[in-house]
Amino acid sequence: MFVLIIRFLMKVLERKTHSNVYDYLFGLVRNGQVDKDGRIPFGRIVVEELGVSRPTVNKAVTKLVAEGVLCKKIGQKGTFVSPEFLGSHGWANGGLASKVIK
């Protein structure tokens, strides 16, 4: 019984952490705090900054990619803000898009 409770609590904490990373990365996109080419910080940077594991960061990024907020570009290393996301949120003319899409 005790083991089941521990496993349940670990799942709850993992979801909370995953949500925190998701919110953090989405906030970077929303506030235009991405590289000039639209690349988001990933891997070691986010792991160290938020104090979470790499698999937790991967889960959040996977969810953002599935939602169309982020995308992977063939032939380029990294994860980028999706041009479709920018356009669908009215950021295609100025604002964040002017920083990201060149």
Image: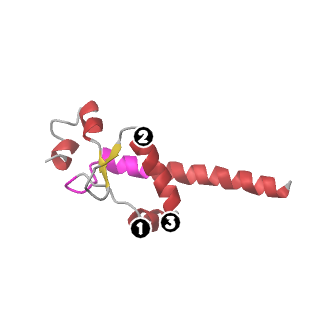
**Secondary structure beneath label 1:** helix
Q: Residues within 10 Å of mark 3 (few under 14, many from 20)?
A: few
Quickly name the residue at label 1. Answer: 44
Residue drawn 24% across the image and 51% down it: 38
Whether the magenta-drawn stretch holds residue 52 is answered as no
Which of the two discs, 1 and 2, sits closer to the camera?
Answer: 2
Residue 57: percent from the left, percent from the top? 47, 56
Q: Amino acid at mark 1?
A: Arg
Residue drawn 52% across the image and 56% down it: 56
Whether pointer 2 and pointer 3 mark residues with C-beta atoms closer than 8 Å, the reply is no
What coloring was used for the rendering?
secondary structure
Q: Residue furthest right?
A: 1
- Determine the CA span between mark 2 and mark 3: 24 Å
Q: Amino acid at mark 3?
A: Gly
Which of the two discs, 1 and 3, sits closer to the camera?
Answer: 1
Magenta highlight range: 24-37
Comparing 27 with 55, the one in front is: 55
**Secondary structure beneath label 3:** loop
**Secondary structure beneath label 2:** helix
Location of residue 2 by image quarter? bottom right
Q: Earlier in the sequence, mark 2 or mark 3?
A: 3
Comparing 12 with 95, the one in front is: 12
Quickly name the residue at label 3. Answer: 51
Q: Amino acid at mark 2?
A: Ala
Location of residue 80 with respect to 54 vertically, above or below:
above
Q: Residues within 10 Å of mark 1 (few under 14, many from 20)?
A: some
Whether the magenta-drawn stretch holds residue 27 is answered as yes
